[in-house]
Amino acid sequence: MSHRNNQGAVIATILNTMSSKEGEYRQGVKQNHQLSKSIGERLAKDGPLEEILMALNNNKGGGEEIVPPGEIKSFLSEQQGRLKALAERNSLRNEKIGFFLGAINQLQQGFETDNAHDQDVDYSSNIENFMKGEIQQMESSNRDLQGSKFCKEIRATLGENEGTAGEDDIEVVRNNEENIGNYKCCITAQWMEDPVTSTTCQHSYSRKGILSYIRSKGGQCPCPFPGCSQIVTQNVLEDDAGMARKVKRNRRRVEAEEEQKKQSQALDMDEDDED
Ligand SMILES: [Zn+2]
């Protein structure tokens, strides 16, 4: 007779509860991000705070500045730096949540298939070892926090132009823009429509495509982007207006190029006719 022992049943319940709380885990991160953005708007380059400080600096001194304007700028850039550091921590936390949920998901799957009915298995020490391994892997993995959506949004809010960092960066941006694969949905293979982005791995998809994919997988699935295995659920998807703009821009460019190619081919044929 096979029956789940008591310890196993308790652990299964705990795992289910943990994975169902994703929205709650992410809520703190989201709130922090919203708050950072609204602070960022005030601290932005040529933003309200800079304006007020500059105005005060001029007026109170009766036309003469109290402090050199450079000091105001450096004060502001110090605050901006703090906000960017906050965004980086926030994005790290968000990634850790994704990692944690991925681990829980693996445990759940293993738990259902493996030896969940075995009385002799010491689940708690198995789980402890597994989680220790996952945490180690997470701590040692390289991540591009600066490239995360949180950090990018805060930099954009602060009025930092991503393209001005240096020639190399401009080149990278251009190359990315030209890689149209980035703007086609990995599920529908078409230009992304109404794109949404996973806050876990930053991959984007057509809204309808990913939602029906998630549904078909029973509410969660590994990210369908080639080479990515982060877990995607409806909760981690966010509207991505920036991506929508990029898709539109690139789609227009590619279609214009194709049109031009067609026209010049037609022209070539005309010339051939004349010969
Ligand atoms: Zn992904």
Image (cartoon, rainbow, N blue to C red):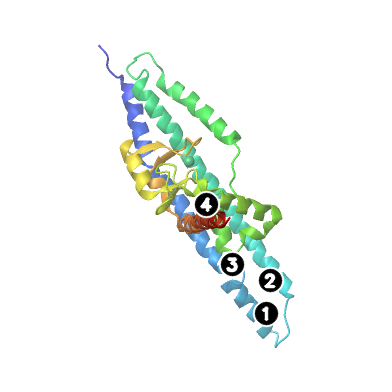
Contact (Cβ within 8 Å) of mark 1 with mark 3: no
Left or right: residue 162 compared with residue 25 = right
Q: What kind of residue is marked 3?
A: Ala
Place of residue 223 in the rendered image (x, y in percent of width and height, measured from the top left): 44, 38
Q: Is mark 3 within 8 Å of ligand 1?
A: no
| Marks 1 and 3, how far apart at CA | 18 Å
- Name the front one of labels 1 and 3: 3
Place of residue 21 in the rendered image (x, y in percent of width and height, measured from the top left): 37, 42
Rendered image: mark on residue 149: 4
| Marks 4 and 3, how far apart at CA | 18 Å
Label 2 belongs to which residue? 72
In the picture as drawn, the residue positioned furthest to the bottom comes out as: 62
Left or right: residue 57 compared with residue 208 = right
Q: Of the residues under marks 1 and 2, which one precedes in the sequence?
A: 1
| Marks 1 and 2, how far apart at CA | 9 Å
Secondary structure beneath disc 4? helix
- Name the front one of labels 1 and 4: 4
Place of residue 59 in the rendered image (x, y in percent of width and height, measured from the top left): 66, 85
Place of residue 87 in the rendered image (x, y in percent of width and height, measured from the top left): 56, 53
Quarter of the image where the C terminus is located: bottom right
Q: What kind of residue is marked 2?
A: Ile
Secondary structure beneath disc 2? helix
Label 3 belongs to which residue? 44
Rendered image: mark on residue 57: 1
